[in-house]
Amino acid sequence: MADVVLRNIVARYEQFLAVDDVSLTIGSGEFVTLLGPSGCGKSTTLRIIAGLMKPTSGSVLFAGRDVTAASAADRNIGMVFQSLALFPHMTVAENVAFGLKMRGAGAAAIEKRVKKMLEMVRLDQLSDRYPSQMSGGQQQRVALARAIAVEPSILILDEPFGALDRKLREAMQVELHQLTREMKITALFVTHDQEEALMLSDSIAVMNKGRIEQYGTPQEIYAAPATRFVADFMGMTNFLQGRVTGRNGDGLNISIGEVTVRTSEPASISNGTDVTFAVRPEKVMLAATQAPAKAAIEGTIRQVTYHGDASRIVLSLKSGETMVALETNDRRSADRSVGSKVWAHWAAEDVKVFAQ
Amino acid sequence: MTMYPLQATLPERRRAARISSAFGASALLTMPACIVIAAGVVLPLAYMLILSVQTPDPGEATLTTNFTATSYVKFFTSPFYWNVLLKTIWVASVTTAVCAFLGLTLAVSIWLTPPRWRGLCVLAVISPLLVSIVTRAFGWMVVLGDYGLINNLLVHLGIIVTPLRMMFTNFAIVIGLVHVFLPLMTLPILTSLDRVDRNIPEAASSLGAGALTIGVRILLPMVSPGLVSGITMVFSLSMSSYILPALMGGADSGMMTTLIYQQFVVTFNWQFGAALVAILLATSLGVVALLIFETSRRTRRWMAGR
Amino acid sequence: MDGRPVIAAIQKKAFWVWSAFLYIFIVTPLICVILASFNQESVQSVPPLQWSLRWYGEALRNPNFVRGALTSLVVATVATIIATPIGVLGAFGLWKSKSRYKAALDAFFALPIVVPGLVTGISLLIVLTAADESAGNVKLICGHVLIVLPYVIRTTLASLAQFNPSLWEAAETLGASPPKILWKVVLPIIRPGIVAGMVFGFILSFDDVNISLFLVDARTITLPISIMSYLQFSFDPSVAAISTILIGITFVSTLLLERLFGLKRLFAGG
C-alpha cells in the first residue's frame, strides 16, 4: 500500500470553484474519510485523486511519485462507485478478474486470486452468477472484491452505501471496516453521513465549500470541533450568543443574558469578545428549579416530540434564542408540558466556544 | 497481502502506447465512415453538379473546365419542361397535404390507443416501410386496376357497369405516394404528441372545449415541430420519387423523375440529366427551407426552452 | 340545452371509424398482393376466383427472379458486412467526441438518408462510368454500403446513448485502456443495437430500387428490379407470388427487429 499526498489542489469549473486549495496526506494503510454536505467538493476531490478528473492546479502524489498527469487506468487504484458499475454482461468471477486481466496476469494466477477474493467476501459459491441475479448486498461485495483484487495503491469509495437500507448499510460498514483493517488497505471514503465517517475512519476531513474545515481523528472531530460549521455538522446544534467576561481557572466565563456559564476549554479569547457557544442537545439537562450552584438558563418549553428512547424538547429562552434538549425517556425529573418553565444546564466540558 | 508483481506493469506500458488525445482518437474512429460517405455521396454529387454545366455530349461523362449553361437554358426556355417541374411540385404538394391530414389523425388515433394495443398499431404502421417499394406499387395496381379490388367490388355491388379508370392517373400517383409516406409523416407527429402532457387536453375539456376544438386549437400547435419534420420529409421524398410515379403513372406521367430517368438510361443525355437533377434538388430544398423558415418564425416564441 | 354529449359521442364514433379506415388503407395493398398470389388463372383477382399455388412454382422457376434473388442476397450480405464495422467505429468516434463539430458530424453521417436515392444512384453511375468500373456486383455493393451504413450508425448511437457511463469509469479505474474498454465492456452491451441496425440495413438493401436502378446492367440484376421489369411486360400472379414470399420474410425480420430494438426509435424524427 502506498501513501497519497494532495498538494494545493484547486478545481475550477468556469466560474465555480469546486475545490479551493486542498492539501491532504493519507498515510499508508490509513482509512481517511472526506465528510461534508452535498456540493462541498468532496466528490470532486475524490475524482481528482482517482484520476477521473484533472485539477486546475496542484499535484497528486502516490508513494512520492507525481501522478497528476496520469490517467485513472495508470494509477493502480481500486474504486467502488455509488452505482456499483458492475459489468452486466460478465459473471461475478469475470468482473473480479477484469483488473487482473488488464494487467496481463496469467490464467492460473487470476483464477487463484479471484477465488481468494470471493472467499474473503463470502461469495465463492456464486462466482458464476451474473450481477442481475444477485441481491444489493451481494452486488456491493462483488464491487468491493473487484476493486481490491488488483492490490491497488489506494481503495477509493464514493458514497458506496448511500442507496442501501439501514440494516444492510450497517452490515456493509462493519464488513468494510474489518476488511480494510485486516488487509491494511489505504482507503479514501466519501460520505455525507457523519455516523458512518465516525465509525469507519482513522482520520476525517470535514469539507465545506471546497475547503477542509478540520482534519483530525473521529474523537477530535466529534468532541473538539474547530469551527462552527464542523460543530453544527457533527450534531452540536445548540448555538447561543454570549460574551467573554473573564478567566476561570482553566476555562472562561461567558455571560449569556444575565447568566454566567463556565467552559473548561483553555481557549485564549480575550475579555469582552463576542462568542458563539455550542452544546449538544443530548448534553442539555433540564431541571424544574434553578439549583443554586449550577449556572442554568431559564427557558419555556415550546414543543415536545417523542422519538422512542428519547424525547426532543424545544425551549425558547428569554433572549429569544431557541435551545433543543434531547432527553432519554427514563430520566424525567421535571414537568415536560408545553408552556412550563425549566432550567437548562450542562457540564462545563460539554461546551465549545467559537469566536465570532 | 504480499507483494505487487502486477502493479509494475501498468504505468510504463501505457505511457508508451498513449495516443495524443481523446480528440485524436475520435477523429481516427470516424475517419472510415467519413471517407465512405464523402466518396459515395458528396463527391459523386459534386461531380454530377459539375457535369451539369458541361457541354451536352451523349454518353460522355468526363469533366472539362469548359463551363456552359446550355442545359439549364434548355430547361428554362421550354414551356414543356416548366410544365413538368410544376406538375411535379403540384403532385408533391397534394401528396404532402393529404399525408399531413391523414398522418395527424392517425397519430392522434395511436396516441389515444390503450397501451396494450399501441405497440401493435405502431408496428402495423411501420412494417410497410420494410417491404420493397415495387411490391407496394404492385399492390396498388392490384387494388386500383381495371379488374382490381375496388372495381371488382363496385361492379359486384352493381354500383357501376364499366370499370373506373384509376391506374395511370395523377390520382393513382398521389394515392401510391401517400400510402408509402404515411408512416414517415405519422411517426414524427406521434413523437411530438408523446411529449404533450395529457393533462392539457383534459384541462381544455374541463373548460368546455369539444374534441374538435381541442384537436385543432390545442394539439395541432403543440405538435408543429413533428408536423414540420414530417412535411419536409414527405415533400422532399415525393419530389424525388421515381419508382412509384413510374409504375402508377406510366412512362408519360409527366414527372421530373421520369424525365431524369429517360435522360440517363434511354437517351444518354447525361449533362442535361444532371442539370435536371440539380434543378429538382434546388426546388425541393427551396420549398423546404421556405416552410421551415415560415413555421419556425411562428413557433419560436412559445417553443423556447423545449 | 345540450346536444353536446350526443355530438361528442357521434364525433367519437366517427373518429374511430376513420381510424379503422386508415389502418385498412395501410394494409390493403399488401393483403391484396398476398391474396392475388393464390389465383389459379393469370388474373390478379382479389379475392381469387380459384385458389392455387401454381404461381409460386412459376415464380421460383423464373430465371430472372432467381438470379435477382441471388444477387440481392449477395449484395446485401456483403454490403452489411462492410458497412457494419465502419458504422460501429464511426458511432464510437462520434460518441466519444468532445469536438465542436459533433453536431455537424452527426448530420454528415445522415447524408445518405437525406440525399434522395435517385440522386445518389445517378451520381454513382456517373462517377463509376467515368472511372470505367464495369463489374456489376462491385457497383451495386458500392451503392448498397451507403444504404446500410447510416442505419448501423444510428442504431449504434442510440444504444450508446443508453450506456451507463459509470461502467466506462469503472473499467478505467481497473486499468483498461480506451480500446480495451470499447472492445470488452461497451461492445458486448450494445450488441443488440448494432444487430438491429444490421438487420434493418440488410432489409433496406435487399428491397432497394432507387439506387440499384442505375447500377444494374444486362448481366447484373437485383430482385426488386427484376420484378419491376417483369411488371412492364406481364401482369400475372407470379409477381404476386414472389412479392408474397418477400413480404413473409420482411414480416419475420420486422418482428425480430422489434424484439431487439424497437422500430419506433429508428424513425422518430421531430
Image (cartoon, coloured by chain):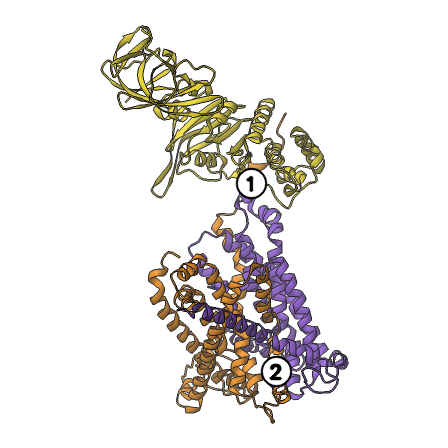
Chain colours: A yellow, B orange, C purple
- Residue A42 tag number: none
Q: Nearer the viewer, residue C245 or A72?
A: C245
The image quarter in which residue C226 lies: bottom right
**Are labels 1 and 2 on one chain?**
no
What chain does mark 1 sit on? C
Answer yes or no: is residue B41 visible: no
On the image, the x and y values in percent for residue B266 come to 56, 87
User: Eyeballing the image, is C50 above or below B199?
Assistant: below
Q: Nearer the viewer, residue B231 or C203?
A: B231
In the structure shown, which secondary structural element does the residue marked by tag 1 occupy?
A: helix
- Chain identifier of the residue bearing label 2 in the image: B
Identified at 63% across, 65% down, the residue is C254
Q: Depth-wise, is mark 1 or mark 2 nearer the camera?
A: 2
Q: Which residue is mark 1?
A: C170
Count of marks placed on residues = 2
Above or below for B73 versus B206: below
Q: Which is nearer the eye, A86 or B24?
A: A86
User: Which image quarter is the N terminus of chain A in?
Assistant: top right
Residue neighbourhood size for the residue with mark 1, other residues' Cα within 10 Å, grouped as few (<14), some (14–19), many (≥20): many
Which residue occupies 51% across, 53% down? C95
Q: Amino acid at mark 1?
A: Ala
Q: Say what amino acid the circle numbered 2 marks.
A: Val
Distance from Cα at disc 1 to Cα at disc 2: 59 Å
Residue denoted by label 2: B143
Q: Quadrant of residue B211?
A: bottom left
Decide if residue A115 is on the left or right side of residue B7: right
